[in-house]
Image (tube, rainbow, N blue to C red):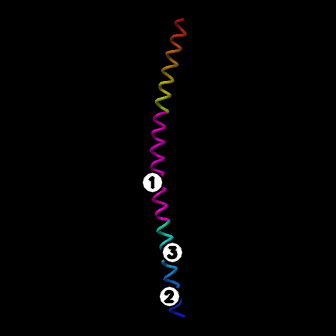
Amino acid sequence: MGIMSMESLKKELMEANESRDAALMEVSEMKYSLGELKDKLEHLETYCEELNKVLKQANKGRDSRSLSD
């Protein structure tokens, strides 16, 4: 009975280690994906800020032309 318990515990330990390793890999992939998303979001924010500046400049130009008409 002791040998059977030992074998059973070894098997459980191996399975637990495999599960842990799989979870660690998944976490690593998620961290990488979050990093990529962060970079894309920062790029998008910069792009939107630039578009907003251009839009404001275009509106100022249009308003200036309207006043001079």
**Residue placed under numbered mark 3 in the picture:** 16
Q: Element at badge 3?
A: helix
**Residue 58: percent from left, percent from top:** 50, 19
Q: CA distance from mark 3 to mark 2?
A: 15 Å
Percent of width and height locating residue 44: 48, 38
Q: 6 above or below 28?
A: below
CA–CA distance between discs 1 and 2?
Answer: 39 Å
Name the residue tied to disc 1.
32
Check disc 3 and give the amino acid type: Ala
Q: Quadrant of residue 46?
A: top left
Q: Tag 2, which secondary structure?
A: helix
Please say if 8 is above or below 58: below
* Quadrant that contains the C terminus: top right
Vertical placement of residue 15 versus 29, above or below: below
Residue at 49% from the left image edge and 15% from the top image edge? 61
Q: Which residue is mark 2?
A: 6
